[in-house]
Structures are given as structure tokens and as C-alpha cells.
Image (tube, coloured by chain):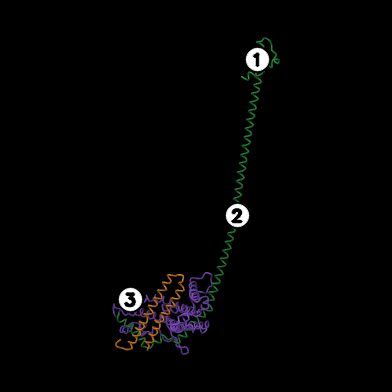
Chain colours: A purple, B green, C orange
Amino acid sequence: MILAAESCDVVNEVICAPANVTELFEFPTIFTVGGLEFSRSSVLMLFAAFVVLALFYFGLRQQRLVPTKFGVAIEGAIGFVRDGIGRDVIGPEGARYTPYLLAMFSFLLVGNLFEVTPLINFPVTSRMAIPAFLSLTTYLIFMFLGFARNNFRYLIDTVWPKAVPVGLRWLVGLIELFSIFLLRPLTLAVRLFANMVAGHLMLSLLLGSGVVFLAAVPEIGLKGSIGLFWFALGLFMFLLELVVSVLQAYIFTLLTAVYIESSIHFEH
Amino acid sequence: MQNLTAMTVLAVEEGGEAAGGLSLVLPAPAELVAGIISFGIVFFFMWRWALPTINRTLEQRQRAVAGQLEEAERAKTEAESLLADYRGQLAEAKADANRIVEEARKQAEQVRADLLARAEAEADQIRVKAREEAANEKSRALSAARTQVGEISVDLAGRIVGERLDATAHKALIDRYLADLEKL
Amino acid sequence: MEGNIEALTGALSLVGYGLGAIGPGIGVGIVAGNAITAMARQPEMQGTIRTTMFLGIALTEALALIGFVLFFIASAG
């Protein structure tokens, strides 16, 4: 703290500005519509949607026999979600949920990758709004499917599973009830949110302290060269976050598909 | 180093102290609205444009590939029938050639046999003629010799006996003498 | 720090989260390790195993994620 206070006097304000974690994630209001204060993160969400639209539009625009390299990549991504997640997990019925899964995967992927995009450097999925909203939508879909396909057997068989020995039924039922109706949506949202928050925090701290120390070299002398170490570590984390971004988008989509499947083929 | 750790810990702690920790896990209304709008746009885009488009493209591609395959199949069949035709023609030609060679060989054989037969016949003829001639010569020489011997003998006998012997009257005698002579 | 009781609560929630992450950490390791064994034994089942593995990890991870949220809630109080 002492160091931070000292260096803030000499180093530019951008680095020193965050006095606590929240300030890394909450930005000043840019404009207000109907009492809602839209900040940089809201704008970035819309920008993420725009990026997804642009990528898919330019990838699929020309319907040619032999697609361009970029077209192949976009088609590969679509095939990955449609066949690798939709069809393989849900089955033949998965085609109905492909638009939802595809929109989810592409939007989350772009949102996550904003974390490691130069000049943006902020994962919009680290704001609870997007994970919570998508998780809630998934929750509503698989709840609706569960009750629509199995009537109230969905709830009853969850609480009182016939496949389990009688003595353990109440315990398993309790765990299942807790897990399906409460933990599933909660963990789905928090997993993505936590990963992105942790990643952004880590990158900001490592790269930020690297810059702070290096900028303070004229003040504190050779001791400041420790900044090089932090900076190198930050670059390593940068690569790691690249993987985490893709993986988290995949896991979110995959779990959505798994939950939908478990409601369609509900057997207890 | 120590300072930095302190800074990190303090930064995290202050985040907690500022009562902003909870605000981090609760969605902000404005961001919720922005997120729903963004995702809605993406979802409608995927649902209404991207997936139908790629399905259409894939169908088109499938049809094109199927057409090309069909075309290739047709060309292959054509080429195969053409090849079979050529093979047949080639076999026919070969058989023809064989037949012609065989015929020629047979003809040559025939000619050779003919020539041989003719030559043999000629040789036989020549041999027979030569034998006949030799026999004729021999008999002529014999008869000439017989006549002469007879005349000489009669002459000699006439001279010895002193009287002229009639050749015709003593023909029997001469013949017997000659037969005796031949027996010797 | 410096005998500040509020600083102590913040540090305590950090320790709590750290303790809460031990169990899920071990659990996720077991799930992933067994999934790898299963994939090595039956490569043709890879897709199913991967999906089940992620489901298992999701269930196991739940505790760590609850701990993560509780950390923020506790440090907010």
C-alpha cells in the first residue's frame, strides 16, 4: 500500500486508479436511458454481439461450392456446436436447440475472448448479468422440458428415485432435488463468472504490477526490475486465459446441452 | 516483494470493505438489459439467418458433389464399355491374324507335300523308264548276240562238217546248244 | 492488518475459500484422472466419457463455486 501510494504520485493515474477489486469491473456511466446507467461493459456486450454477427455474416456470405479459409473456420465452428454438442449430447432432437446453443457458444466465446483482446481487455462475461441471464434461460428451458415431457413425475421421481434402495432414497432424493433445482443454474452461472473474474483479476494484477514496478525504476532503483518477472508471469497467464476463455464457453454450452438432454430423457 | 504482497492483499481487502463485493456477484440492471438485448440479437441472427444459410449451402454443396459423382460414374461406365469394345476388337483381330497365319501355314504344307509327291513320282517314272530301257537294251543285245553266235556256230560247224548247214533246219540244234550255254 | 478487525474478516473469508477449494480440487482431479483412464481403455467411447466427465466435474466443482460466492458475500458484510 505504501508503495502503491508512493508510485501513484509519479506513475500515470490509469494504473493506480483501482483502489479495490470492484473498480476493475465497474466502469463509470457513459449514458443513461430510462434510469438505467449504461457503462463501458454494457457497450462492450453490444459490441460482442456485433462482432459475432460480423464474423458469421462474412463467413457465410458467399454460398460458394468451395468456401474460403475463413468460411471453413466459421462452418467448422457451426459444425462443432451442431454435431459435437447438439447432436452427440442431445441426440436427433438436438437440432431444435442448435440455434440456442450456437448463439450461446459464439456469444460467450467472443465475450470471453474480450479478456485477451488488446484495447478491450475486459471479459464481458465477468459481469454477472450475462452468465445469470443465460443460466436462467437454460434453467427455464430444461425445467419446462422436464415438466412438459414427464408431468409431475419429473419432480416426484427426482425426490423419490425408484432405482435406489429404499433406505437411501430420501438422501439421494434430497441431493438430487438440491442439485437439479438449485445447484445447476447457480453453478452454471457462477462457474463462468468466477473463471472470468479470476482471469481478469490475475491479468490486471500481474501485468499492472509489472508496469508499476518498471515505471518506478527511476524512483526505487534496481529493485524495480522485479517488474520484469511479474510481466513475464502475466504474459504466461495471458496464454492460459486464452485457453480458459475457449474452454469455459465450451463447458457452458456443453452443460446446457447435458441439462436439456437429462430433461428429455428423464429416467429414474 | 513484501510491499507488493501487501498491496495485493490490501487491494482485495479494500474491495471487500467497500461493500462492493456483493455488487460484483449480483447482475447490474443496465448490464442485464444490455446482455439480454445482445444475446437476443445473436440468437435471432443464428436462428433466422446463419443456420438456414449454412443448411442451404451444405445442401447445395451436397447436390453439386452428388452431381459430380454421378457424372464421374457415367464417364467411368462409358470408358469401361469403350475399353471392352476395344478389347473385343483386339481379340477379334488377333484371332483373324492367327487364322490367316494358320491357313498360310497349311497352304505351304500342302504345296510342299504336292511338290514332294510330284518329285517322287517323277523320280519313279525316271527309274522305271531307265530300267525298261536297260532291259530292252539287254534283250536286244542278247538276241543280237544269239543271232550272231548262231550264225557263227553254223558257219563254223558247216566249215567243220564240210557241208553247208541249213540254218533253219538246224534251228532246234542251235537253240539246244544255246540253252546249254545259258545253263553254264 | 494493524489489528484492524475488518481486515481480519476479509482475510478469514479468503482462508475459508481456500479450505473450501481443497475438496473439490481433489474431486475434480479424481474425476479427470479416471476419465483419462477410461478413454485410454476405450477410445471409441471418448465422446460419451468426455460429456460424463464434464458433468461429473460440474457436480464436484459446485462446492468450490459456492465457496467463491460466499467469499464475496462474507467479505461484503
The residue beneath circle 1 is B153
Q: Quadrant of residue B72?
A: bottom right
Q: Which residue occupies the foreground of this view, B149 or B108?
A: B149
Q: Position of residue A235 (x, y in %)?
A: 37, 75
* Label number found at residue A85: none
Q: CA distance from mark 1 to mark 2?
A: 95 Å
Q: Residue at x 32, y 81 (%)?
A: B5
Q: Position of residue A48 (x, y in %)?
A: 46, 80
Q: Position of residue B112 (x, y in %)?
A: 61, 39
Q: Position of residue B33 (x, y in %)?
A: 47, 86
Q: Which residue occupies the foreground of this view, C54 or A5?
A: C54
Mark 2, secondary structure of its residue? helix
Binning the other alpha carbons within 10 Å of mark 2 as few (below 14), some (14 to 19) or many (20 upward) gives few
- Please, which residue is most extreme toward the bottom here? A35
- The answer to whether residue A66 is visible is yes
**Dot 3 and dot 1 within a common chain:** no
Q: CA distance from mark 3 to mark 2?
A: 83 Å
What's the residue type where badge 2 is placed? Gly
Q: Quadrant of the N terminus of chain A?
A: bottom left
Mark 1, secondary structure of its residue? helix
The residue beneath circle 2 is B88
Residue B109 versus residue B144 in the image, above or below? below
The residue beneath circle 3 is A229
Binning the other alpha carbons within 10 Å of mark 1 as few (below 14), some (14 to 19) or many (20 upward) gives some
Binning the other alpha carbons within 10 Å of mark 3 as few (below 14), some (14 to 19) or many (20 upward) gives some
What's the residue type where badge 3 is placed? Phe
What's the residue type where badge 1 is placed? Ser
Is residue A54 left or right of A212 when viewed as pictured? right
Camera-near label (3 vs 2) is: 2
**Dot 3 and dot 2 within a common chain:** no
